[in-house]
Image: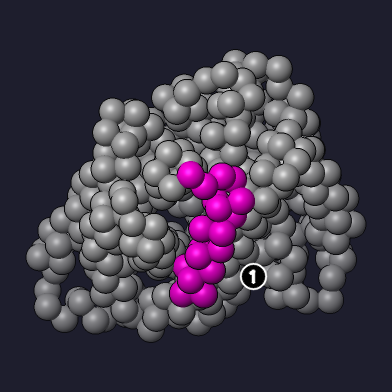
Amino acid sequence: MTTLVKGRASAAETPPATPGPTSLVPLLAVGAGVAVADNYYLQPLLALVGVDLGVGVGTLGLVSALALLGYALGLLLVVPLGDLVDRRPLVTGILGLTTVSLAAMTLAPSVGVLAVAAFAVGLTSVVAQVLVPYAVSLADDASRGRVAGTMMSGVLGGILAARVVAGLGGGALGWRAVYAGATGLTAALLVVLLRRLPAETERHRRNGRADVPYREVLKGVARLARGEPGLRVRAVYGFCGFAVFSAIWTTLAFHLRDAFGLGAPAVAGVALLGLAGILVAPRAGALADRGRSVLVTGGAYALLLVGTGVLALGADSLPLLLLGIVLCDVALNSGHVTSLGVIYRLVPHARSRATTVYMTAVFLGGATGSVVAASAYAAAGWSGTAAVCAALAAVALLRWLLRLAGRAPRARDEPFPEAVA
């Protein structure tokens, strides 16, 4: 830790390696996508892992939850460092640990070893959430939501690619081959970022950095959560939304196999439906930039509730199942990118800490969704999963309605109303 803090001082003496900071955004988006993919190969492969290691959906739900809990812990302990130290050594150091953890998953001889390695991958793949506020800090106020949308498109693209690769690669070569490829890809990203990622510029440090000790940053996370009601509300939305997302994907491969006789390649085909959410995310961010974040949020979680209803009808109908997944995906991505834009405006001096609060809630929701949905699926099949998703969507929409009822009517359309909540 001392080395990292000292690195902050030396970074000021190092000139940036690129001609302009905004040119880094595409690279950072790709890097975030590759990094976040490491934590998403597992869910589409759960059925294959279960056959190989001889375990059922309940145990595999716990393994999936451990990966998400590891991510939540990484958000709590690692992401706040983005407000404190030069992100270049932070990002590359974490990627090195991710590479080692992926190699351990590739070679795991038992479900216990796999669970530990999955937790480690989750813990270290938080580098994606270091890169998002890094990119947002490069933007001016007028384009911050658009940059957040671009970064989230990279993240969502990584999630989509992980599912497609896991489905196709797992079906053709086995789940271990997928993790071997992920190990190599992450190592390649590490090399690229070592060569291309510059030390932070003075402008970048002024735009969202804090010169305080690490322990104070961690205390600041708790203070931020207590002191920003708008951030807490967004954390509730994120918890419920990602719990739905994780519930679907923890049990989907089992449902496709049990109800329709489809294998891992079908999971890849379903994953491609996520393109709808990727295309919508930047548009939702741009609409929020124009002062419509409240309305976008309400529309997103209303659509999510509708989507979970359609999911329930997909217990015996593949077309309805696919339609429900599309509706849920569009709703979740719209709500998520809108929340990111809001929290970055709420606390421009502490974006990484705001990301910590929000994304920790998101991944705690994901872990909860994995465990609860796996148990519900084991007890009641896909109807159990759909019921869990509908309950979570209803909680998010009810929270939005309660918040809307407490606002003055004009606040529904004023620019960035969360900032005055």
Q: Is residue 276 magenta?
A: yes
Q: Is residue 241 above or below residue 18?
A: above
Q: Circle 1 — which element?
A: loop
**Residue at left 38%, top 32%?**
374
Instruction: State how many labels appear.
Output: 1
Up-down relation of residue 331 to residue 193 (above or below): below
Q: What kind of colouring is applied to the model shown?
A: one colour
Residue 120 percent location from the top left of the image:
64, 29
Residue 78 in the figure: left or right of residue 258 = right
Residue placed at 64% from the left, 70% from the top? 138
Front in this rendered view, residue 102 or 352: 102
User: With 63 as the anchor, is 336 left or right in this view?
Assistant: left
**The N terminus - image quarter:** top right
Q: Which residue is mark 1?
A: 138
**Residue 340 at x, y percent in the picture:** 45, 62
The quarter in which the C terminus is drawn is bottom left
Q: Main secondary structure of the magenta part?
A: helix
Q: Residue at x 54, y 51 (%)?
A: 267
Magenta residues, start to end = 261-280
- What's the residue type where badge 1 is placed? Leu
Residue that protrudes farthest toward the front in the picture: 261
